Amino acid sequence: MDTMSPSSEEFPWHLGVHDAHCHPLERPNTFKELTTMKTRTVTVMATRLEDQPILQKICEEQGPNNSELTHDTKIVAGFGWHPWFSHLLYDDTANPLPEDKDVVDDENKRVDHFTAVLVPPPDKPFALALEHPTPLSWAMAQLREHLKASPLAMVGEVGLDKAFRLPEPWEEGQAVAQQERDPERTPGGRCRRKLSAQRVSMDHQKAVLKAQLKVAAEMNRAVSVHGVQVHGVLFELFRELWKGHELKKESSKNKRKKNNQASQGESSNQTDITSASSKVLATPKPFPPRICLHSYSGALDSLKQYYGPTVPVDVYVSFAWLNNFRGSDSASARAEEVIRWVPASRLLVESDLHKISAESDELLECMTRKICELRQWTLEEGVKQLGRNWWTFVTGSDSGWEVKETEKPK
Ligand SMILES: [Zn+2]
């Protein structure tokens, strides 16, 4: 891995580093590294039908640790369907299918569904070779159940993606053979299959995203959002949701004041009166209280809209070394510009990696060092600030947060 310019300053793992978005559900056997990783907490994203029950089980194994955030918490869960799997949700909003079915088996329904949601429409053999879709109503009922069982959990990974194309469906027997070759991998992933010409229509992706945001709003949970080549569309979708709930001038001034306070690293344990998300809401609002734009790849100007004075949502932006700094120079330059601009209290770091390993630790270290360099923070300042941001993103307030040092690794 090409790391950043070497710095002699020792990395302060002991102050607590939190991965705001990662995918070890692709390799669930790597959860055994939870006890040896240098990272203090992983925020684990689900993406599709196959990985939600694995995450559910892992949450159950955490026991009571899973209901209140403490410095001993190892995992915060994100339940949801990624846009890359959105075509596998069958929109039965208008005519709900029976609630006990997790897949739609009927051939005609399957062909009609994939013809409607894929662009260009696939031929029949392609449609029938795809996994059987899951009724959206069933998936959302499951999502509610998962969130109920895990009070700390958020909704993620959800979002929109204009660039993505479907992999070619498995030929007869191939999926099973793949599973036998690599039994530790969660089924349903791409596994280096060739890409087809098919994309998921933006309308369908939006319907799937809105359904999930509705659940997040209902249950007052944060969301971790994926957006590729859709920065304007995504903002419009959110803006539609919070229409009529915009902040008035006075409260937006307070919100700004709070952002600045946080950026000076002051810890305030007093009741947070200004955060858009910290109040327990009597009537749920139609939008989630906190959003994280994960591996944000857009331009600074698109991002600025999220920080307008009337936006009633706390928006966080997280960066991954792999996605933001390993591509083109222009992508890195864009990310650098955004990192310098984002309110200090809204920055997060993530690995976005498919496993928990020494590599995920290293990626977080690289990303944190980069952010500290760009913000001219010492590593200690930066790690503390990012830790507090992550805590506030997960819980909606910094109450209970304080720097807790663990023993320095030898
Ligand atoms: Zn991701």
Image (cartoon, helix red, strand yellow):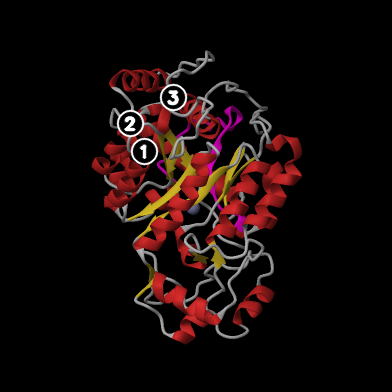
Q: Secondary structure at mark 2?
A: loop
Tell me which numbered mark, 2 or 3, is placed earlier along the sequence.
2
Badge 1, how many Cα within 10 Å: few under 14, some, many 20+? some
Front residue (pair 337, 204):
204
Q: Is residue 390 left or right of residue 77?
A: left
Three-letter code, disc 3: Ser
Three-letter code, disc 2: Glu
In the rendered view, tell whether residue 277 sits above or below residue 258: below
Quadrant for the C terminus in the image: top right
Three-letter code, disc 1: Trp
Q: Are marks 1 and 2 in contact (CB under 8 Å)?
A: yes
Q: Secondary structure at mark 1?
A: helix
Picture disc at residue 383 = none
Q: Residue furthest toward the top? A: 270
Picture disc at residue 246 = 2
Residue that badge 3 annotates? 275
Q: Is residue 2 visible?
A: no
* Marks 3 and 1, how far apart at CA: 16 Å
Residue that badge 1 annotates? 242
Badge 3, how many Cα within 10 Å: few under 14, some, many 20+? many
User: Residue 9: x, y in percent?
Assistant: 48, 30
Give the main secondary structure of the magenta stretch.
loop
Q: Are marks 3 and 1 in contact (CB under 8 Å)?
A: no
Count of numbered labels shown in the rendering = 3
Q: Secondary structure at mark 3?
A: loop
Q: Residue at the location (64% across, 37% down)?
A: 151
Q: Residue at the location (47% across, 78% down)?
A: 168
Q: What's the magenta region?
A: 1-25
Tell me which numbered mark, 3 or 1, is placed earlier along the sequence.
1
In the rendered view, tell whether residue 172 sits above or below residue 131: below
* Marks 2 and 3, how far apart at CA: 13 Å
